[in-house]
Amino acid sequence: MYSLLPNAVILAKEYVAKALGPGGRAVDATAGNGHDTLFLARLAGEEGRVYAFDIQQAALDNTLERLRAAGVDKQVKLTLAGHEEMAGYVTEPVDVVMFNLGYLPGGDHGIITRPETTLVAVKEGLTLLKPGGLMTLVVYHGHAGGAEEAREVDEFAAGLTQEEFAVARLSFLNRRQAPHYVIIIEKSR
């Protein structure tokens, strides 16, 4: 419908595509149905590595199926764990960390990302980022618990020091449908 301002997910991907190239390392903190994981795997290429996390086996199954169909499953490590546990599984610096907050599309809407685990994951992700690395958080706040998570993520991101991070929030002022906005955090070089 719009080419320059399509939606928050596509805007996040446009920034990520500038930060992740062949041989790069990335984290998909919320694998979901595998769309972002596939996107990251294609950018990182055969020599790259993508770590993807989800708390639902169905999400990882969907992701693996999507990756295999595209022939890019070898460079992806899928982990059945909450994103707040990423530092226990990712032991190398990464170029990119992507979050897509909310719930699994097509899944149980009662299983959602929560501020207490999301904030831990964001902090861990920021420590994993290489200098010049990028984190994106696509935020949905229309579901139960979403407004609280959005508020807490916004407050945390706004409190990051400008000496260490550049933080932007791109939101759509006249759109009611989700996703609502994207937060982009770049780590200082």
Image (spheres, rainbow, N blue to C red):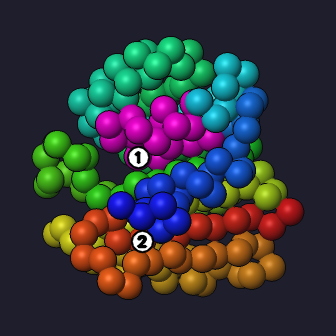
| Image quadrant assignment for residue 44 | top right
Counting other residues with Cα less than 10 Å from the Cα at mark 1, is it few (<14), some (14-19), or many (20 or more)? many
Q: If the image is split into quadrants, where does the N terminus sit?
A: bottom left
Q: Residue at x 59, y 30 (%)?
A: 42
Number of marks present in the image shown: 2
Element class at badge 1: loop
Q: If the image is split into quadrants, where does the C terminus sit?
A: bottom right
Residue projecting furthest to the right: 189
Q: Which mark is residue 5?
A: none
Instruction: Identify which residue, 60 or 120, lies in the foreground.
Output: 60
Q: Residue at x 28, y 66 (%)?
A: 178
* Label 1 sits on residue: 30
Q: Is residue 119 visible?
A: no
| Residue 22 covered by magenta stretch | no
Q: Residue at x 38, y 24 (%)?
A: 66
Residue 134 horizontal side relative to residue 86, left or right: right
Q: Is residue 79 above or below residue 153?
A: above
Q: Residue at x 74, y 64 (%)?
A: 187
Q: Which mark is residue 181?
A: 2
Instruction: Identify which residue, 116 or 141, lies in the foreground.
Output: 141
| Residue 27 covered by magenta stretch | yes
Residue 84 screen position, x and y as percent: 46, 51
Residue 26 screen position, x and y as percent: 62, 40
The amino acid at mark 1 is Thr
Element class at badge 2: strand
Q: Where does the magenta region start and end?
A: 26-41
The amino acid at mark 2 is Tyr
